[in-house]
Image: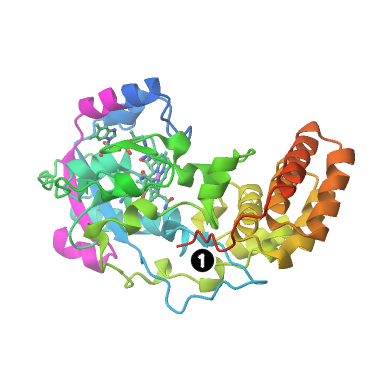
Amino acid sequence: MLAAAKSLGIDRIGVTSAEPFPELRERLVLHRALGYESGFEEPDLDKRTQPSLLFEAPRSIVAIAVAYPSKLKNPPVSEPGARRGILSRSAWGEDYHRVLARRLERLAEWLAERAPELRWLSMVDTGALSDRAVAERAGIGWSGKNCMIMNDELGSWMYLGEMITNLPLPPDAPLLDQCGDCTICIDACPTGALVGPGQLNAQKCISYLTQSKGLLDEDAMVKMGNRLYGCDTCQIVCPINRGIDSRHQAETLPDPEVAKPLLRPLLQMGNREFKETYGASSASWRGRKPIQRNALIGLGNFRDEASAGDVARVLREDPRFELRATAAWALGRIRGDVASAALAEAAEADADERVRAAASRALAALSEPAPKRGRRAGE
Ligand code: B12
C-alpha cells in the first residue's frame, strides 16, 4: 500500500487500529468545559472517539495526507488604491474535501482489487472522527504545539483524511514529537489563542473569527489585518515548515487572483459571482458574508482613502447590518471627508441601532488625532 500511495496521488499513508480514542475523549471533554470549541466540530463525543459507532465491525483506519503549497509564485502586489486580502493556504487550490475524497475513492478501488471483501467509510474534515488524532496514531505526523499534524518532509502543509475499513491491516507506529522546547508558534499567535502546547481556544483563533458571521470586536478586527479566510501565522513561523513548499499536486496550486484578491470588488459581489469566483475553494463554505465583512476590515486596516467611496456605499446601501456596522468601523479608520459624511448620516439615520452605535463610535474616533499610517498586517 505504501508503494502504491504515490501513484494514487497520496503523499503519506499510515494505518491505525479501529480501537477507541480514550485520551482524545478526555481532552475533548476538557476542551468543551473550558469553552474552547469552535462549534464546527461534531458534537457527539462518543461518535468522535469510537469508530465502531460509525461503522459496523471496523478493523482498521487508513489515514492519508495530501500536501499543498505554502508559497504564492508571482503574487499580485497590494498597493494604495488596489489593496488585496489573503486566503489561507489550505483554501488556495481546489476545495480539499473534493481532492481528498477522490484520493480515498482511488485508494478504495486499489484495496478492493486486492481484497474484494472490502467495506469502507471515508471522511475528510466534516466526518465525526478527529482527523488529527487518527493521523497522529497512524504515524502520518506528530501533533505540534500549534495543534498541527506535521512531519519532516511536508511540514504541516498537508490535508488529512481517513478511511475506516473492515480489513485487519497492520498498524504503523506514531512518529516522535520533534517540537522540543520550541514555543515560537505559541508566542506568535496574534490573539493568544494557543493557550498552551497543543491546546487552542478556537473562539480566539483568527482562523475561526474569519469564518464567523457576526460582528467582531475592535481588537479582533485590528488583529485580523487583511486576512479574508483562515490564518496561517502559527504555521508560517514554525521552523519545521521552513523551506517546505510542495507544488506537485496540481489541484492544490493557487490562482493568485483568488488567493490574494483585490478587496474593493469583493464589496459589491453578488451571490452568483461569488460562487463563480470562490465556489471551487474551501473558503466558500460559509458563503460570501464573512468574506465581504473581512474585506471591509482589511480596507479599514489599510486605512486606504481611495476605498472610502466603496466602503461608504456599503454603509449606505447594504441590507446586512453586520456589513454596515463593519463598514462604519472601517470608515472611522480610513477618515477623510467621504468617511465623515457617510458616518454622520448613518449615526443619525440608519434603521439599525447597532449600526448607529458603530457609526457614532467611529465619528468619535475621527475627532482624535490620526494614528501613524503604515500598519500593514499581511502575510
Ligand atoms: Co481546522 N483543520 N484548521 N479548524 N479543523 C482540521 C483540524 C484539519 C484536520 C482538516 C483536514 O485537513 N482534514 C486540518 C489540519 C491539518 C493538519 O493538522 N496538518 C485543519 C486546518 C488545515 C486548519 C487551519 C490550518 C486552517 C487555516 O486557517 N489556515 C487552522 C489551524 C488552527 C490550529 O489548530 N492551529 C484551522 C482552524 C480551525 C478552527 C476553525 C479554529 C477550528 C478549531 C481548530 C482546533 O481545534 N485546533 C477547526 C476545526 C474545528 C477543525 C476540525 C473540523 C475539527 C478539529 C477538532 O476537533 N478540534 C478538523 C477536521 C476534523 O478533525 N474532523 C479540521 C478539537 C481539538 C481538541 O481536536 O485538533 O482534532 P483536534 O485534536 C488534536 C490536537 O489538538 C491534540 O490532540 C488531538 C489529536 O492530535 N490536542 C491536545 C487536543 N487537546 C490537547 C491538549 C493537550 C494538552 C495536548 C498536548 C494536545
Q: Position of residue 304 (x, y in %)?
A: 67, 64
Instruction: State which quarter of the image contains the N terminus.
Output: bottom left
Residue 270, image quadrant:
bottom right
Query: Which quarter of the rendered image does ligand 1 occupy?
Result: top left
Q: Residue at x 85, y 46 (%)?
A: 344
CA neighbours of label 1 inside 10 A, class few (<14), some (14 to 19), many (20+): many
Magenta residue span: 1-27
Q: Is residue 211 left or right of residue 344?
A: left
Instruction: Please state which of residues 1 and 33 is positioned toward the viewer in this rendering.
Output: 33
Q: Quadrant of residue 96?
A: bottom left
Is residue 26 rendered magenta in the image?
Answer: yes
Of the 4 image quadrants, the one containing the C terminus is: bottom left
Looking at the picture, which amino acid does disc 1 mark?
Ala
On screen, residue 246 above or below 352: below
- Which residue: 71% across, 45% down? 365
Where, by quadrant of the figure, is residue 133 drawn? top left
Residue 24 sits inside the magenta stretch: yes
Q: Regarding mark 1 in the picture, which secondary structure is present there?
A: helix
Residue designated by label 1: 259
In this rendering, position of residue 372 left or right of residue 43: right
